Image (cartoon, rainbow, N blue to C red):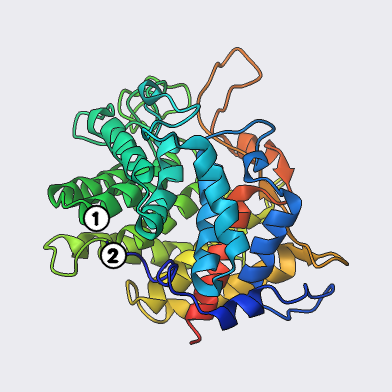
């Protein structure tokens, strides 16, 4: 099994690194340790049990998987057993000996439920516990039968028929790409590549190069343009999900694969468009990307750290032009200045993250998500949203790896 550079070394991290990781927490305003170590420790300080991450009750969902992927990646660098134990506590609660997953319903056919499965690969590699492999196979089984558009794109969820969302490319595609390499299913790589090709073909705006949040093949949704099927706005985090997905799947598409260049080209087009909407004053990004300063719009943390991660990783691994390393560093610096605080106990927080945003629902209820500008800017904003915390850890780690 081959893992990404971020999680390499999980089984062999040295004792010296562990001593560094367990050093006293720095006081406010002092960066005695890399930010990724401090944020990982802050996650554990805020939620001593991983079962309360982003949920009052234990939940198998994408947000928990995102944060725990970050924490486990930090363990891969530090060897700090507290971080591994924290991650394992979550997965050992949910994964039964037969590989079944508590609270998971395969018939829901939600790509969101796949994301937490990414952490199962390094856990299985380290422990060789068969329950992790069986759980991986269960999630793969879902995607074998997952409903699709007519050309083959995965629906975001069964209850969102005929819809592809940018978010969904992050949730399932890197998992499937890693499965293809780990368990020798090479044809699956083509299926993964197709998801990005089709999503870009439908959602990319030829004028700006930005991608709309969602596409409805049926044109039946009230949020969808009756001619194109597209939603109305360029939501920052949706494009952030898509961007992270591109650099993550490239970890698993062999360099010899004849279609690898298609993903590289999509990433290049996305990067070209994204840097044009980076806020020149702060270095970060607006909630609705192409409407800076419009009444109600605001600088948003989760999209910003997702783009920082994408540029830093993409440039470091030469998935994209090395010039984007500078853009990644400028975004990261802006994130730290605009959104990061550290309290007197050394607990780090990230602020101004959009709590949640989606498309659809019931137009006659308070849960209707219209995809309009007003909708996106009026959704709740919170501190330490996992969609900001997880990518911040990963972006910080990429920043460190890029300077070694």
**What label does residue 334 carry, if any?**
none
Using the image as rendered, state which of residue 13 and residue 209 is in the foreground.
13
Q: Along the horizontal axis of the image, is 289 left or right of 214?
A: right
Q: Which residue is mark 2?
A: 2
Whether residue 184 is visible: yes
Whether residue 308 is visible: no
Q: Please tell me how crowded label 2 is: few (under 14), some (14-19), or many (20+) other residues with Cα within 10 Å.
A: some
Which residue, as the protein is rendered here, is positioned at the far bottom? 404
Which residue, as the protein is rendered here, is positioned at the far right? 344
Using the image as rendered, state which of residue 267 and residue 88 is in the foreground.
88
Residue 391: x %, y % from top left:
55, 59
Using the image as rendered, state which of residue 198 and residue 32 is in the foreground.
32
Residue 150: x %, y % from top left:
20, 28
Q: Quadrant of residue 168?
A: top left
Residue 159: x %, y % from top left:
41, 20
The answer to whether 280 is drawn above or below residue 183 in the figure is: below
Q: Along the horizontal axis of the image, is 254 left or right of 114?
A: left
Q: Earlier in the sequence, mark 2 or mark 1?
A: 2
**Is disc 2 placed on a helix, strand or loop?**
loop
The answer to whether 171 is drawn above or below residue 364 in the figure is: below
Q: Which residue is mark 1?
A: 182
Asked if the residues shown at circle 2 and circle 1 are in contact, with their CB atoms under 8 angstroms apart, the answer is: yes
Residue plotted at (48% across, 75% down): 13
Using the image as rendered, state which of residue 313 and residue 186 is in the foreground.
186
Q: Please tell me how crowded label 1 is: few (under 14), some (14-19), or many (20+) other residues with Cα within 10 Å.
A: some
* Marks 2 and 1, how far apart at CA: 7 Å
Residue plotted at (42% across, 54% down): 123
Q: Along the horizontal axis of the image, is 153 left or right of 370?
A: left
Residue 178: x %, y % from top left:
29, 54
Which residue, as the protein is rendered here, is positioned at the far top? 364
**Is disc 1 placed on a helix, strand or loop?**
helix
Residue plotted at (46% across, 44% down): 116
């Amino acid at each position: 099994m081959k893992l990404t550079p971020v999680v390499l070394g999980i089984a062999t991290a040295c004792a010296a690194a562990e001593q560094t990781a367990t050093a006293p927490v720095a006081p406010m305003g002092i960066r005695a340790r890399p930010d990724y170590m401090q944020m990982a420790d802050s996650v554990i300080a805020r939620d001593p049990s991983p079962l309360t991450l982003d949920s009052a009750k234990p939940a198998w969902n994408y947000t928990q998987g995102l944060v725990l992927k970050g924490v486990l990646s930090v363990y891969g660098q530090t060897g700090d057993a507290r971080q591994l134990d924290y991650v394992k506590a979550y997965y050992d609660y949910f994964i039964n000996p037969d590989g079944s997953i508590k609270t998971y319903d395969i018939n829901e056919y939600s790509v969101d439920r796949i994301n937490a499965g990414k952490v199962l690969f390094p856990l299985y590699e380290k422990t060789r516990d068969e329950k992790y492999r069986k759980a991986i196979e269960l999630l793969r089984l879902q995607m074998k039968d997952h409903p699709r558009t007519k050309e083959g794109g995965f629906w975001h969820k069964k209850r969102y028929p005929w819809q592809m969302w940018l978010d969904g490319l992050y949730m399932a595609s890197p998992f499937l790409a890693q499965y293809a390499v780990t368990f020798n299913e090479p044809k699956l790589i083509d299926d993964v590549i197709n998801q990005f090709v089709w999503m870009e073909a439908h959602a990319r705006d030829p004028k700006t190069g930005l991608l709309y949040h969602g596409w409805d093949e049926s044109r039946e949704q009230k949020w969808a343009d009756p001619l194109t099927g597209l939603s109305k706005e360029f939501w920052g985090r949706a494009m952030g999900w898509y961007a992270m997905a591109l650099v993550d799947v490239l970890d698993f598409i062999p360099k010899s694969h004849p279609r690898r260049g298609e993903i590289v080209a999509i990433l290049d087009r996305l990067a070209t468009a994204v840097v044009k909407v980076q806020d020149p004053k702060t270095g970060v990004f607006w909630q609705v990307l192409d409407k800076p300063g419009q009444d109600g719009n605001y600088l948003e943390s989760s999209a910003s750290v997702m783009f920082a991660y994408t540029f830093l990783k993409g440039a470091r691994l030469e998935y994209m032009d090395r010039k984007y390393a500078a853009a990644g560093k400028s975004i990261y610096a802006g994130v730290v200045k605009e959104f990061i605080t550290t309290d007197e106990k050394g607990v780090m927080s990230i602020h101004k993250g959009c709590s949640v945003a989606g498309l659809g629902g019931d137009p006659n209820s308070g849960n209707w998500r219209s995809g309009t500008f007003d909708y996106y800017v009026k959704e709740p904003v919170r501190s330490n949203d996992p969609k900001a915390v997880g990518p911040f850890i990963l972006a910080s780690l990429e920043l460190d790896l890029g300077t070694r």
